[in-house]
Image (cartoon, rainbow, N blue to C red):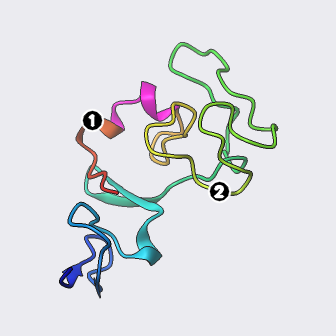
Amino acid sequence: MSLTKCNICGQEFRPANDKIKRCPECEHFITLNGKIYRRIPFGEEPVEGIDYSGHDIADYSLPTCPECGADKSKYHFAACHHEICPACLHIHSTCDCYVNAEWEI
């Protein structure tokens, strides 16, 4: 596999496959509406998982995420419905921020 440029920091790195667009140092970041955000690890959510209808849909005091199994202080697995959007602080599956997100592996 040849070198590719990280779409976050611009550093060249050798990805494991051609779908990976971020270097290992940037894998926990996401670009939303042209701005780079750090993803929020499980258990470090600033709010108690409120969706747009006002329902509390996740218990972030648990030792692991009830959907994807991520441990405390670890990042949710891709497409986990309990991950909080770092831009609007809502559950990402209920917010509009991810519609046009640059979300690569």
Observer-side mark, 1 or 2, equals 2
Side of 42 relative to 23 (left or right)? right
Which of the two residues, 20 or 102, is positioned nearer the viewer here?
Answer: 20
**Residue at 74% of width from left, 42% of height from top?**
64
Q: Which residue is mark 2?
A: 74
Q: Which residue appears at 68% of the width and 38% of the height?
A: 65
Q: Which residues are magenta?
A: 91-97
* Helix, strand or loop for disc 2: loop
Q: Residues within 10 Å of mark 2 (few under 14, many from 20)?
A: some
| Foreground residue among 105 and 42 | 105
In magenta segment, residue 61: no
Residue 41 lies, with reference to residue 92, above or below; the image says below
Image quarter where the C terminus lies is bottom left
Q: Residue at x 42, y 71 (%)?
A: 26
Q: Quadrant of residue 7?
A: bottom left
Name the kind of residue labelled 2 in the image.
Lys
Give the Cα distance between marks 1 and 2: 24 Å
Question: Quick one: quadrant of the N terminus?
Answer: bottom left
